[in-house]
Image (cartoon, rainbow, N blue to C red):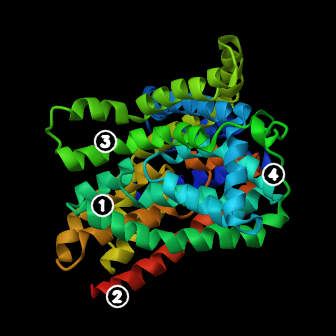
Amino acid sequence: MTTGLFLLVLVASIILLLFLTIVVKLHPFIALITTTAFVGLATGMPLAHIVTSIEGGIGGFLGMLAPILVLGAIVGKMMEVSGGAERLARTLIHLLGRRRTHWAMMIVGYICGIPVFFQVGIVLLMPLLFSVARAAGMSLIMVGIPMIIGLFTVHCVVPPHPAATAVAVALHADLGRVILYGLIVGLPASIVAGPLFGKLIGNHFTLQPPEHLQQIAALPDEALPRLDVTLLTILCPLLLMISKTVFEAILGPHNPAMPLISFIGQPIVALFISAILAYGTLGLARGRNMHELAVFSDKAIGPMAAILVVIGASGAFNKVLMDSGIGEALKVVLTAWQIDPYLLSWATALILHIAIGGATIAMMTAVGLILPILPLYPTADPALIAVAIGIGTIGFSHVNDPGFWFVKEYFGLSMPDMFKTYTASTVIASFVGLAALMLFRMALGL
């Protein structure tokens, strides 16, 4: 097939997926698998290869994500049933005031998103979000969009997040500078697309939390766990996951202690330890017994099934897009562009995110396209190129992005409302981030 035909199939697949989910109203899992099969058949993939790609895509996405989601859900459930989320909500509102709750949640998402995957951050913070929104009497969209966009911005831009780190290493950029540049550029993007945009649209959408995430009745203050215990439990996975980066910088990668530190800092291990800690601090220490903890765990894990199958199907879609040759066709088109290196890096990542979906895949593909042409721009700062790729990846999250379905399932939004809220916020964040990057570039004299 020619490059033009590959791109035509890509456009047709996106249209088909939108039609099946919005017009036909098929379940997202069925719609995604149907579209995935269409891509494979339309591009001439062997039938056996289509099946293998679907299986590989689902397994690749869920292999690590499934246990992370389950363990994170258990921590979140323990926060909910113990009153820990209510304690955090009351403290947060008391310190910052009810009128600035949406700003507080953007900051929480921005900070907590640094060491964790986007999906993990949602799992950990969603109980807090619902309790804060209820206590503040604010729209879930007004409070939730700032938190989500804060998480997603640092997910794409700031190391030690794996994708951002991998991009920086591939470009041979200084990690310290990437972190500094990413925080500087990402903050205005999060502010405009988060609390400002959230306040603008929040009251136009009336939502109720999904049944399995409904906040329990408010407890008297004396019945809530202590703030320090609550913070220790909720921050435990974040601290464990970031410890690998901190200790590696202090001790060096070849220190004899690093294998153990790296093991504990793995997301699955960190969340397993945190779940056990939550059983103790927010369960047994609160007078619960093991049978009750098992019941709470069942209630937390059950709703994960619907989310996992949708994310797995999205992974299959992404995998077939790459295996079918559409990814290579995009490379041919993008490498022919002759524009500013920072704008090219941003646009490449943006287009790949629109076409491929998964942020990590889009970022790694984008850096692969940029590396061969980077020598043509000897004055370009690799650290700023890395940030440009991350900022571009934020934009236009839609139906082929696993994060899109993750947010949709948690918030219970309709497809049109997802485009008006979450997708729109990612577009705003990406373009505001580009403007901030260009201004920062000018300030650096690049």
What secondary structure is found at the residue carrying circle 3? helix
How far across and how far down the image is residue 39, in percent? Answer: 53, 43
- Residue kind at label 1, given as amino acid type: Leu
**Residue at figure coordinates x 34%, y 82% from the top left:** 441
- Are circles 2 and 4 on residues that touch, CB within 8 Å? no
Query: Which is closer to the viewer, label 2 or label 3?
Result: 3
Name the residue at 64% across, 55% down. Answer: 15
Frontmost of labels 1 and 2 is 2
Dot 4 crowding, Cα within 10 Å, few <14, some 14–19, many 20+: some
| Residue 254 in sight from this viewpoint | yes
Closest to the observer, 290 or 190 = 290
Please name the residue that numbered disc 2 is placed on: 442
Report the number of discs. Answer: 4
- CB within 8 Å, label 4 to label 1: no
Q: Secondary structure at mark 1?
A: helix
SS at mark 2 in the image: helix
The residue that label 1 is drawn on is: 369
Q: Amino acid at mark 3?
A: Lys
Left or right of 139, for residue 376? left
Left or right? Give the position of 408 relative to 7. Answer: right
Q: In front: mark 3 or mark 1?
A: 3
Q: Disc 4 and disc 1: Cα gap in Å?
A: 46 Å
Q: Position of residue 315 (x, y in %)?
A: 51, 39
Which residue is labeled 4 in the image? 134
Nearer to the camera, 99 or 339: 99
The numbered mark, 4 or 1, whose residue comes first in the sequence reads 4
Disc 3 + disc 4, Cβ < 8 Å? no
For residue 244, the mark is: 3
| Foreground disc of the pair 4, 1 | 4
The x, y position of residue 126, in whole percent, is: 66, 45
Instruction: Work out how far the residue at label 1 is from the one at label 2, CA to CA, in angstroms.
Output: 25 Å
Residue nearest the observer in this picture, 215 or 334: 215
